[in-house]
Image (cartoon, rainbow, N blue to C red):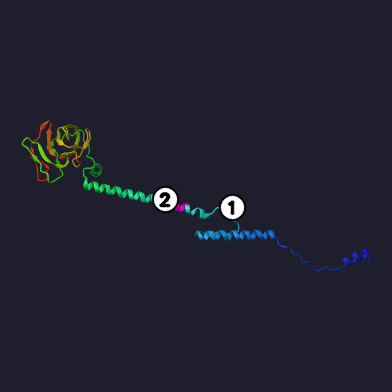
């Protein structure tokens, strides 16, 4: 058979269907498998950290430079530990300060810290300049806080006592001067324009010239020697007063 006839016969062969099979790319399958493995790995790590689970297929593989949530947890735990330690130190410091104030208040009432806090609680008197009140217009208190100490007033009007105790001014005012003589101190306090007090025989003084004086805060300390308190009206010694059973100064009617 000639080539022409063969070709003609081939053209007359009927064709009814045509099936085409396309082989799936191995590369795409491997990429899909890789994404699935990455998603599963991320979900497993997040489940262990009790965080929301990652979803979706848009997961990028960063290889060795991938961020690890587990690496952050020790740092956060260390930070919380340091914060807890700091709070504990602050709490202990507050307790120690309160204990110190309580102990000094019990065993050392005339300490500087007690004097400071007593001044905050009691407040400062309202300044009056000038204060022209006379001594008889003022209500005085006691110059000692110990009820076992007996104060007496001489005929000249000088108040005296002997004992170991804190010494107070009979009324508030301002320290005018402090003089030392053979180991003891004499303090002059100005209460008003005409009224003043001189306290002699103090073993220690807590104030300096120019300081404000409060009747409820000690001005000095007696180590057991004799203390004398003299009050003056325009330079004249006042003698028209007595002391009651509480050692408070009371003006004669």
Residue that appears at 35% across and 49% down: 90
Q: Position of residue 75 (x, y in %)?
A: 47, 51
Q: How many marks?
A: 2
Neighbor class of circle 2 (other Cα within 10 Å; few <14, some 14-19, many 20+) is few
Quadrant showing the C terminus: top left
In primary-sequence order, the first of circles 2 and 1 is 1
Q: Can I make out residue 62 in this image?
A: no
Q: Residue furthest right?
A: 2
Membership of 51 in magenta stretch:
no
Magenta region, residue range: 75-80
Horizontally, is 47 left or right of 189 in the view? right
159 and 192: which is toward the camera: 159
What's the residue at 33%, 50% (across, down)? 92
Question: Can you tell which mark lies on residue 64?
Answer: 1
| Residue 39 makes an appearance in the image | yes
Q: Quadrant of residue 2?
A: bottom right
- Image spot of residue 57 (x, y percent): 60, 58
**Residue displayed at 64% across by 60% down:** 32
Q: Tag 1, which secondary structure?
A: helix
Q: Is 13 situated above or below 205?
A: below
Q: Nearer the viewer, residue 119 or 72?
A: 72
Residue position marked by numbered label 2 in the rendering: 82
User: Between marks 2 and 1, how big is the CA–CA gap?
Assistant: 31 Å
Asked where in the image residue 246 lies, by quadrant, the reply is: top left
């Amino acid at each position: 058979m000639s080539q022409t006839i063969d070709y003609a016969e081939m053209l007359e062969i009927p064709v009814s269907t045509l099936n085409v099979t396309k082989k799936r790319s191995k590369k795409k399958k491997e990429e899909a498998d890789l994404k699935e493995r990455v998603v599963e790995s991320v979900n497993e790590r997040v489940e262990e950290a009790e965080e929301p689970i990652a979803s979706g297929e848009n997961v990028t593989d960063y290889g060795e430079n991938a961020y690890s949530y587990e690496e952050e947890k020790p740092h956060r735990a260390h930070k919380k530990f340091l914060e807890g330690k700091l709070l504990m130190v602050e709490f202990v410091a507050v307790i120690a300060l309160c204990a110190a104030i309580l102990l000094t208040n019990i065993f050392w009432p005339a300490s500087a810290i007690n004097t400071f806090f007593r001044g905050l609680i009691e407040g400062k008197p309202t300044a009056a300049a000038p204060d022209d009140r006379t001594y008889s217009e003022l209500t005085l208190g006691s110059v000692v806080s110990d009820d076992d100490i007996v104060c007496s007033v001489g005929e000249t009007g000088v108040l005296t006592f002997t004992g170991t105790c804190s010494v107070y001014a009979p009324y508030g005012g301002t320290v005018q001067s402090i003089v030392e003589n053979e180991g003891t101190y004499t303090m002059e306090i100005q209460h008003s324009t005409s009224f003043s007090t001189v306290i002699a025989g103090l073993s220690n003084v807590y104030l300096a010239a120019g300081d404000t004086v409060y009747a409820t805060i000690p001005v000095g300390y007696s180590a057991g020697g004799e203390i004398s308190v003299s009050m003056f009206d325009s330079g004249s010694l006042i003698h028209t007063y007595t002391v009651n059973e509480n050692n408070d100064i009371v003006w004669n009617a």
